Image (cartoon, rainbow, N blue to C red):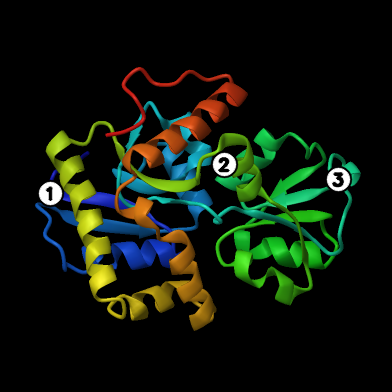
Amino acid sequence: MPDAAVLSLGLSPCPNDTHILHALLHGLVRLPFNIRPHVADVEELNALARSAALDATKLSLGVVPYVMRDYALLSSGAALGRGVGPLVVARKPLPERAWPQARVVVPGLMTTANLLLDLHGGFQGERREMLFSAVMPAVRCGGADMGVVIHEGRFTYARQGLVKILDLGEWWESVSHAPLPLGAIAVRRDVPGPIALALQKAIAESLDYASEHPEASGEFVRAHAQEMEEGVMREHIRTFVTGFSHDLGQAGRAAIEELVTRAAGLRGQEMPAQGLFL
């Protein structure tokens, strides 16, 4: 890292990230260095991770095979759990025999959502990437046969007149018998160990603060969520902020190892000798 007194930290504008990191970013937990936040769509963060541009960043597990030599995953700040998976949606029910040729829009080719499509193997048709907020409108207007929705789309797709074709989280849990890892916070391997550990501890303390003062992050969450309804924001936080967000523990680490190992095999890449985690 170029300046040991300032750590650049990427986060998405999603309510789970802003809820978890609010206290850290507002000086409500102690850190031996300053944070320079970079708020961006998760696919932009994935691209920045591929160029090792940020000292630490939230990223999709789908991009980890491409960045694991440069980054190590932290035990705090993750989005991981059961019942949290991306959904494949369409304008009308489509039988499984129609899936292989279907045109599918995804919220980024490096996202965990797109990785799950690859791992499933049943979607071989044209695939296009776009911002997650554009996926449902593209499906609704006929620009694609199916779309993969993430974030708040899990709670709002039916209002858009769309139907669920497949819950990729349920599929993953059925084949892996593990919770689904969606995203994690990673720190660049050249960040000094004491600073990386301090960040990991501070993220957990920031979530503790959010749990003890649930209204404190409200304004910050709303400012970044923009048009999201209050009820959807609360449901988003309840769904994607889990016990694994505080500490992955053995089960969380095993779930990430399982997903990344499968992804690395699919991409023809080797796992790093130094391991995935800090």
Q: Position of residue 210 (x, y in %)?
A: 27, 69
Q: Are marks 3 and 1 in contact (CB under 8 Å)?
A: no
Q: Amino acid at mark 1?
A: Ala
**Nearest the eye: 99 or 58:** 99
Q: Position of residue 135 (x, y in %)?
A: 69, 60
Secondary structure under tag 2 reads loop
The residue indicated by pointer 1 is: 5
The residue indicated by pointer 3 is: 96
* Residue 274 occupies quadrant: top left
Q: How packed is label 3: few (under 14 Cα within 10 Å), some, or many (20 or more)?
A: few
x 87%, y 41%: residue = 101
The residue indicated by pointer 2 is: 110
Q: Position of residue 191 (x, y in %)?
A: 21, 36
Q: Amino acid at mark 3?
A: Glu
Q: Amino acid at mark 2?
A: Met
Mark nearer the N terminus (2 vs 3): 3
* On-image quarter of the N terminus: top left
* On-image quarter of the C terminus: top left
